[in-house]
Image (spheres, rainbow, N blue to C red):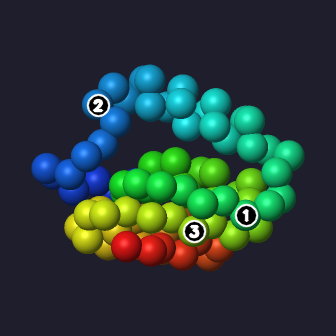
Amino acid sequence: VNLYQLEGEFSQPNGRVCEKMVTWAVERTQSSKNDLLELYCGNGNFTIPMSRNFRKVLATEVSKANTECARENLTANQVKNVQFAR
């Protein structure tokens, strides 16, 4: 997963812990083929890796800058099953 992050926007501060959190979430949802509602998706840090475990994802984010960043990250990672709501 390739992610673009904007300076000054929220991100997980500890890279190692973040990697473990994402891995845990992806592993726990592997058998799910339902839809996912993600709140406060940020730049798509969880959205993108988890999207392959779900039929559709509706991701929400209050920051317009992070929403645009997440859209760019979806394109860069060729993810097609995610929509955003602000």
Residue 29: image location, x then y, percent: 75, 43
Q: Quadrant of residue 25?
A: top right
Q: Label for residue 58?
A: 3
What amino acid is labelled 1 in the image? Asp
Name which residue lies at 16% across and 51% down: 7
Dots 2 and 3: beta carbons under 8 Å?
no
Which of disc 3 and disc 2 is earlier in sequence? Answer: 2
Q: Where does label 2 land, which residue?
A: 13
Q: Kindly state the secondary structure of the residue where label 1 is placed.
A: strand
Dots 1 and 2: beta carbons under 8 Å?
no
Q: Between 51 and 78, which is closer to the camera in this rendering? A: 51
Q: Nearer the viewer, mark 1 or mark 2?
A: 1
Label 1 CA crowd tier, 10 Å (few <14, some 14–19, many 20+): some
Say if residue 78 shows up in the picture. Answer: no
The answer to whether residue 30 is left or right of residue 70 is: right
Q: Where does label 1 land, which residue?
A: 35
Q: Kindly state the secondary structure of the residue where label 3 is placed.
A: strand
Which of disc 2 and disc 1 is earlier in sequence? Answer: 2
